[in-house]
Image (spheres, rainbow, N blue to C red):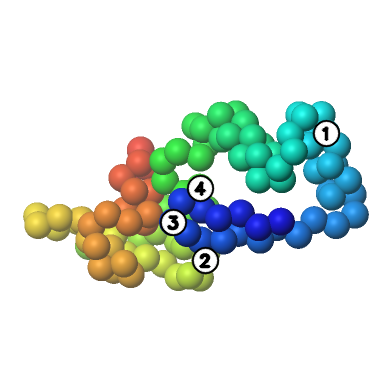
Amino acid sequence: MSITTDKGEKLNVHLKGEVADKFKRIKGYLGLEQDTEVIRTLVTWYFAQHEKELSGPPKNLWHFNLNDNGVVIWDPFLHWGVQIFFTPKGIPCSIDETDDCRHIQFALCQPDI
């Protein structure tokens, strides 16, 4: 099945075996004809159930160290410590070279930073 996002990106989903069988059972239970409607319904339901966890900064980063320049956030995707600088002119990120990225969002939401 193929799903197109609002940005025109296509998401292709291939289900096999037990997962495909579960999908067909859910589709039948919900009485939906289109696979896309099943995905939309499940995503909307999941987001409603977990909105608090899905909002805010990513949960896969962690506070690694405080130093004279600011704070270091460990990013497991980069396998690298990301320096967040605390300066009078702003709070830039050493990796993204911006003052509004996921590393900064994470750092600003931590009570111990």
Q: Which amino acid, by three-letter code, is at mark 4?
A: Lys
- Crowding around mark 3 (Cα neighbors within 10 Å: few <14, some 14 to 19, many 20+) is few
| Residue 88 image point, x, y percent | 9, 55
Cα separation, mark 1 vs mark 3, equals 29 Å
Left or right of residue 21: residue 101: left
Q: Secondary structure at mark 1?
A: helix
SS class, disc 4? loop
- Going by the numbered disc 2, the residue's amino acid type is Phe
The C terminus lies in quadrant: top left
Residue at the location (35% across, 41% down)? Answer: 109
**How far apart in space, not on screen, are marks 2 and 4 (Cα)?**
12 Å
Q: Earlier in the sequence, mark 2 or mark 4?
A: 4
Per the image, label 3 sits on a secondary structure element best described as loop
Q: Nearer the viewer, mark 3 or mark 2?
A: 3
- Residue at 85% across, 57% down: 16
Residue shown at 42% from the left, 53% from the top: 63
What is the C-alpha distance between the residues marked 4 and 1?
34 Å
The residue pinned by badge 4 equals 59
Q: Look at the numbered discs 4 and 3 and tell me whether their residues touch, using CB distance below 8 Å.
A: no
